[in-house]
Structure formats: structure tokens, C-alpha cells
Amino acid sequence: MPVTEIDTILIRRYPNRRFYDTSRSGHVTLEEIRDMVAEGYSIQVEDSKTGEDITTRILLQVIMEFDAPKLDILPRQLLCEMIRINDRLARECLGQYFASAFSSFNELRERTAAIQRLPSPKIPPRLSAPAVADSRPHE
């Protein structure tokens, strides 16, 4: 599904919970949204009635339905704290923390990939030990 000249695919969610991909002018499923993201496309999902950006909720729904084991990397205590803390504090502190952590992760991944693309250094063949003169008398 190649999309050209589009930075972000805009998807609208209608009250009947159907998703409409404005770039293809057609309905898409949650699984197709997952595939778009997996292929590297950037998406934005908005509520058709309010215009509210609901991308984060939809991405969480995708993870819950298709990639739930990935949630196991989040410590239980962190999830409990996210429920307990003030909304403003969560947006400011946790948002910045996760953005920074994700940026560091991507940088490390790119560095690792760059190192793996480097040609292997040529290692000279192992030199054989010099012949040792026989110390026995010659007959």
C-alpha cells in the first residue's frame, strides 16, 4: 500500500467505530492501521465528530489487541503510578521521560546498525612461529 507525498496518514474514526483512511478514501480496520504503522507510516487518528486527536488511544488499542506481550516490558508499579498521579503531572513528567528514553533507544539502535554495516577489518593471517634451529649436533 504505497502512499506518496503524504507525511502523515489522516484517519477518522466515526461513531460506529469504523475508521476512514483519507489518503485512500476508504475504510480500514484496526489491523490495517497496525500494518501501516509497522511499515513505517506515521498516522494521526481524529474523532470525526469532535476533531479530537485520539491517535494515542488508538495506538494503545492496537497494542492491546495485537501486541499485548509488549506491554509486559512496562513494570506493574509504573502502570499503577500512572493511574494514581495527577493528569497534568503525567503529561509533563512521564511524557518528557518517555520521549527522552525513546530518543535514546532509537539513537542506540541506529548506532548499532551503523556499526554492523561497517566492513569487517582485515586481520592479517596468523604468522607461523619461526623455525627453531635444531640444537642437536649434526652428524
Image (cartoon, helix red, strand yellow):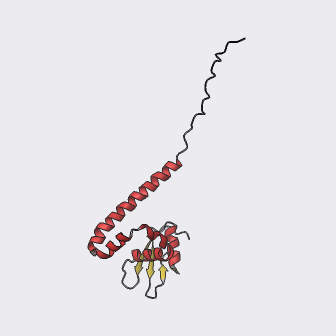
Residue at image position (47%, 52%) is 112
Residue at image position (43%, 58%) is 106
Residue at image position (37%, 77%) is 53
Observer-nearest residue: 74 or 115? 74
Across and down, in percent, residue 98 comes to 36, 65
Vertical arrangement, residue 109 with respect to residue 120, above or below: below
Residue at image position (30%, 75%) is 84
Left/right placement of residue 1 relative to residue 72 reads: right
Left/right placement of residue 47 relative to residue 138 reads: left
Vertical arrangement, residue 112 with respect to residue 19, above or below: above
Across and down, in percent, residue 44 comes to 42, 74
Vertical arrangement, residue 135 with respect to residue 119, above or below: above
Looking at the image, the residue that sits furthest to the bottom is 16
Q: Quadrant of the N terminus?
A: bottom right
What is the tally of numbered marks visible in this picture? 0
Q: Quadrant of the C terminus?
A: top right
Across and down, in percent, residue 70 comes to 47, 69
Looking at the image, the residue that sits furthest to the right is 139
Is residue 126 in sight in this rendering? yes
Is residue 42 in sight in this rendering? no
Observer-nearest residue: 138 or 95? 138
